[in-house]
Amino acid sequence: MKTSLGIWALGPMVTRFVPGGYQPEHAGDSTAVKVARAVEGLGDLMDDYEFHYPNELSHDNLDEVRQALDGHGIYTVCSGLHLDPRFGKGGLTSLDDKVRAEALRLNREAAELAVEVGAEMIIWPGGEGYNYPFQVPYRDVWSRLIDGIGDAAEVLAAGGRQLFLEHKNSEPAMKVLMRNIGMALHVIHTLRARGITNVKINMDWQHLIMNGENLAEYAALLAAEGLLGHQHANSGWGTFDDDNMVGATAFMETLELAIELRRAGYGDNGERLGFDLYPYTEDQVGAVKRSVLQWNFIESVAAKIDGPALREAQQVKDAVRAYELVYAALGA
């Protein structure tokens, strides 16, 4: 399975408590500088890279970034509306038509850039939501969200590219509209009814963990529906979007996910394991490298598990036998 990395893992690591970031020495780094640092440190461990439009990648720096990529690819262009203060109360869901038109324009441009460079697109509508009861007219903002996502999807479809939707329950909006897998599927099925069929799911592991959504279960269900589009690999404690190193926590859940991804043939058609990490205080390249290596170990354990025997145990819901097989692969 090929890999990709969100270049935001190599920034200054800002938080609302430390606006300058825990690693302010990287505050002035251009995207090309970040890419060069990643490429030098990770080499062949990382195949491709992911960028937000227009903050991290646009026509203004495309040539410079491509040179820094040194043969590596651009796998996704991500909507960057949540990075723009103009959309603090929503972009696609803004009830101010002028504000919304600007958000639609930027997302169309991101989609056009994705088509131009042969990338897919991610929309994570983290700023599309509300902070208080009584704040928004729910039907209106949901209608605008789905229409806005469909607008970008149609641009991508015309260029033969895919759109991946990523859900999250909160932050920056305290209540993100598309905050679980079910709501993301609601968007996809609504668009399918309109003839828009190039939209799939990007599973951000920590976003699912925060919701109590089982990684392996949802991967299996999405694969069965042909909607398993992309993965954002990470881990965390489950209460916040930690974006910690893969396998640092939720080890067994990640191992079970590795089994389901193998069963689904994920990666056989060019799908990537994308790393979405935010190493607040750690060496950034080191944290990414450790995540790749830890995933490789987890995946190797999954490969050692007796697949037919595990299937037999699962057919009779025998958890004891299942764990016997899992721990045997771990060396017990």
Image: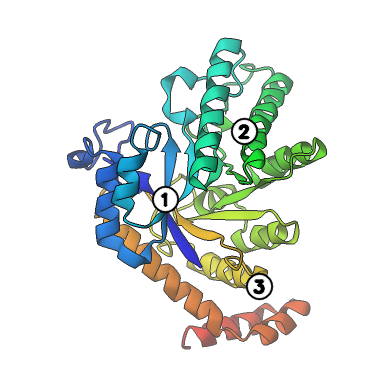
Q: Do the residues labelled 3 and 2 touch (CB within 8 Å)?
A: no
Tell which circle, 2 or 1, labels the residue nearer the N-terminal end: 2
Residue ID at (29%, 57%): 39
Residue 180 figure quarter: top right
Nearer-the-camera pick, 126 or 118: 118
Residue 225 figure quarter: bottom right
Q: Tell me residue 305's x, y (percent).
A: 58, 83
When the figure is inspected, residue 254 is found, relative to residue 307, above or below; the finding is: above
Residue 20: which numbered mark, if any?
Answer: none
Left or right for 272, reference 177: left
Q: How far apart, in angstroms, are the residues tagged by discs 3 and 2? A: 31 Å
Q: What residue type is labelled 2?
A: Ala
- Point out the frontmost of discs 3 and 2: 2
Tell which circle, 3 or 2, labels the residue nearer the N-terminal end: 2
Residue indicated by mark 3: 263
Q: How far apart, in angstroms, are the residues tagged by discs 1 and 3? A: 26 Å
Q: Which amino acid does label 1 sit on?
A: Asp
* SS at mark 3 in the image: helix
Residue ID at (28%, 43%): 32
Residue 152: which numbered mark, if any?
Answer: 2
Q: Would you call the spot at circle 1 few (<14 residues within 10 Å), some (14-19), or many (20 or more)?
A: many
Q: Which amino acid does label 3 sit on?
A: Arg
Tell which circle, 1 or 3, labels the residue nearer the N-terminal end: 1
Q: Tell me residue 70's x, y (percent).
A: 31, 56
Q: How far apart, in angstroms, are the residues tagged by discs 2 and 1? A: 27 Å
